Each structure stands twice: as C-alpha cells, then as structure tokens.
Amino acid sequence: MSKPVSWFLVAFGVWSWFIWPNFLRNIWSDPRSFDDGPQAFFLVHLVLVVVSLVFGTAIAVIGVRGVRGARRRSR
C-alpha cells in the first residue's frame, strides 16, 4: 500500500471519530429520540454511529500499519 493511500485511511479514521460523536450528540438532543425511553429513531442512529466508529477505527488501523510498512520499506 502506498504512503498516500495509507495516510488517507488514517485521515478517514480520524474524520470518523470527529464526525460521528458529534452526530450522536445532535441525535441525542433531538426530541424524536426519547419519549418514555429510547425510540427507534435514536436506536437506529445509535447503531449507525457504533458501526461507523468500528469501521473508522479498523480503517485507521490499516492505514497506520500501511504507514509503518512504508517507512520500513524506505529505510
């Protein structure tokens, strides 16, 4: 994997951790989220956030490994 691709994957992971928690805060404060407990609207978006964070983390880990591998190859 090339260095630019690896850095793109790392940036994608960081972006995911920047965007999705903020999205969850916005959903949490939405009046459709809770009415005597969590509503389907909230639960669906919560699953979306969790899955996106897991994928973002996995993609960032792949990117970090790619960056490390590119450094080893260039020595």
Image (cartoon, rainbow, N blue to C red):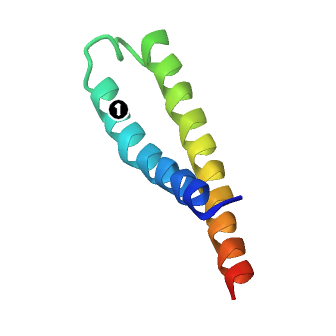
Q: Give the residue at mark 1.
A: 23
**SS for callout 1:** helix
Q: Position of residue 46 (x, y in %)?
A: 49, 27
Quadrant in the rendering for residue 31: top left
**Which residue occupies the foreground of this view, 58 or 70?**
70
Residue 48 rendering spot, x and y as whole percentages: 53, 26
Q: Report x, y in % for residue 45.
A: 47, 22
Q: Where residue 9 appears, x then y in whole percent?
A: 57, 52
- Res 52 → quadrant: top right
How many numbered discs sit on the rendered protein?
1
Q: Is residue 1 left or right of residue 14?
A: right
Name above or below for residue 35 compared with residue 5. Answer: above
Q: In screen coordinates, is 35 left or right of 13?
A: left
Instruction: Tell which residue pokes out farthest to the bottom in this image.
Output: 75
Residue drawn at 25 percent across, 26 percent down: 29
Q: Residues within 10 Å of mark 1 (few under 14, many from 20)?
A: few
Which quadrant does the N terminus fall into? bottom right
37 to 62, vertically: above or below: above
Rendered image quadrant of residue 72: bottom right
Residue at 43%, 19% in the rendered image: 42
Q: Quadrant of the C terminus?
A: bottom right
Tell me what residue is drawn at x 35 percent, y 16 percent. Answer: 34
Report whether 5 appears left or right of 43: right
The kind of residue on which mark 1 rests is Phe
Closer-to-camera residue (29/69): 69
